[in-house]
Amino acid sequence: QKEVEQNSGPLSVPEGAIASLNCTYSDRGSQSFFWYRQYSGKSPELIMFIYSNGDKEDGRFTAQLNKASQYVSLLIRDSQPSDSATYLCAVAEEDDKIIFGKGTRLHILP
Amino acid sequence: EPEVTQTPSHQVTQMGQEVILRCVPISNHLYFYWYRQILGQKVEFLVSFYNNEISEKSEIFDDQFSVERPDGSNFTLKIRSTKLEDSAMYFCASSETVEAEAFFGQGTRLTVV
């Protein structure tokens, strides 16, 4: 059974600090990795995607991928209260499906 | 900005009834997906669809479920005989390629009573 694992949290981070979200995956053949943000009762919203080892930055967000360790992370700099949400790690597997982790609840403390 | 649209936003149905959930994927996308999220739980993969056929399905997607692309724009999920445990938020998604990011619709909240 291929898995995407995340710590469910909640992760509490002071406003203005860096939030660090982590994810591991089991399918070594996975090539594409995504971070989605989901507010309560809403649909997942794409935040970042990453295909290559290393870091990818977009504004306050940085995605990090280490395929050897099967590990992907998301850093949120200068955390804002509006960043409070559940963050879903998703992995595109070789067999035409995208698998989601259970999500990490992030709470930014004002 | 192109988006995935789903209708209805909320569907209430009696147990044993058939429901059809509708989706219009982004027009140049080739891969379509249905996901389910039971309240408070993870987003679960149901099925992927490419080139007018199912390319992958999960163990959740049993004989009660079917998908169809009846025309060039719509993508539907049918549940033949709904059960109480089918109550969930159903999300449609689409992507340009199998490796590309998937964009989600706003979801249909299905309530089976």
Image: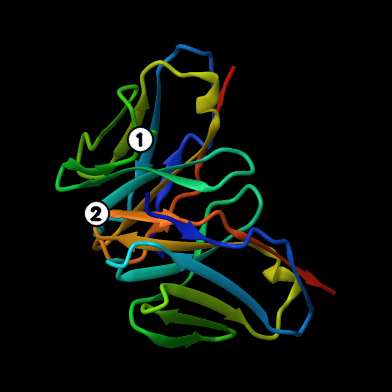
Q: Which residue is mark 1?
A: B59
Direction from residue B71 to residue A79 in the image, left or right? right
Secondary structure beneath dot 2 equals loop
Neighbor class of circle 2 (other Cα within 10 Å; few <14, some 14-19, many 20+) is few
Secondary structure beneath dot 1 equals loop
> What subunit carries mark 2?
A
Against B36, residue A11 (above or below) is below
Q: Hey, which quadrant is residue A9 in on the image?
A: bottom right
Q: Which mark is residue A95?
A: 2
> What amino acid is labelled 1 in the image?
Glu
Query: What separation in Å lies between label 2 and label 1 (alpha carbons)?
Result: 14 Å
Q: Hey, which quadrant is residue B82 in on the image?
A: top left
* Residue depicted at 71% across the width and 69% down the height: A82
Q: Is residue B9 visible?
A: yes
> What amino acid is labelled 2 in the image?
Asp
Direction from residue A15 to residue B33 in the image, left or right? left
Percent position of residue B46, x then y: 37, 40
Percent position of residue B91, x then y: 45, 44
* Residue depicted at 16% across the width and 42% down the height: B52
* Residue depicted at 20% across the width and 38% down the height: B71
- The residue closer to the viewer here, A47 or A52, is A52
